[in-house]
């Protein structure tokens, strides 16, 4: 057990050291409130696609909130890193194109539009166990 703890601490230290440079090229922007709601067409909701659908996921304290979100096809989700550590939003399985935010520094955002129906699993590649799902209807 001690060896595992030492290994995890060493990995965290290396990760934090590697994340010192932030090139801020995520191209994101938008909301910060945690919600499983989505904005319907014609009602606003910055960060949405041409259909006007948008949703957001917060990244506080090494977690995704909400962890599981259900949206309609064509919805754009914006993840906002409100933690004081870097995170990633990386597809781990399911339909549609692969996506990877790269390292998101505190305050950074990442957007992804979901057009393919099904359940998409995603993870933070920096923090084992930090995972979420997007269900597209």
Image (cartoon, rainbow, N blue to C red):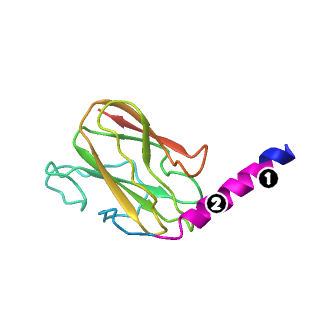
Q: Whole-percent x and y of residue 57?
A: 42, 53
Q: Mark 1 points at which residue?
A: 6
Image point (49%, 65%), residue name: 82
Q: Which type of secondary structure does the marked residue at label 1 adopt?
A: helix
The answer to whether residue 94 is left or right of residue 47 is right
Residue 85 lies in the magenta stretch: no
Image point (53%, 48%), residue name: 125
| C-alpha separation, residue under disc 1 versus residue under disc 2 | 12 Å
Q: Mark 2 points at which residue?
A: 14
Image point (18%, 57%), residue name: 43
Q: In the figure, 19 relative to 64: above or below?
A: below
Mark 2 burial class by Cα count in 10 Å: few <14, some 14-19, many 20+: few
Q: In the figure, 32 relative to 77: above or below?
A: below
Quadrant where the C terminus lies?
Answer: top left
Q: Which of marks 1 and 2 is nearer the N terminus?
A: 1
Q: Whole-percent x and y of residue 51?
A: 15, 48
Front-most of 46 and 81? 81
Magenta region, mostly helix, strand or loop?
helix
Q: What stretch is highlighted in magenta?
A: 5-21
């Amino acid at each position: 057990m001690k060896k595992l703890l030492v290994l995890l601490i060493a990995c965290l230290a290396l990760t934090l050291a590697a994340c010192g440079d932030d090139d801020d090229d995520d191209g994101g922007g938008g909301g910060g409130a945690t919600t499983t709601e989505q904005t319907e067409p014609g009602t606003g909701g910055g960060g949405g696609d041409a259909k006007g659908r948008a949703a957001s996921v917060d990244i506080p304290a090494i977690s995704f909130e909400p962890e599981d979100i259900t949206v309609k096809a064509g919805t754009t989700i914006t993840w906002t890193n409100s933690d004081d550590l870097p995170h990633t939003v990386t597809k781990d399985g399911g339909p549609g194109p692969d996506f990877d935010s790269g390292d998101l520094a505190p305050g950074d955002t990442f957007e992804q539009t979901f057009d393919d129906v099904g359940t998409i699993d995603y993870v933070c590649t920096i923090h084992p166990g930090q995972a979420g799902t997007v269900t597209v209807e």
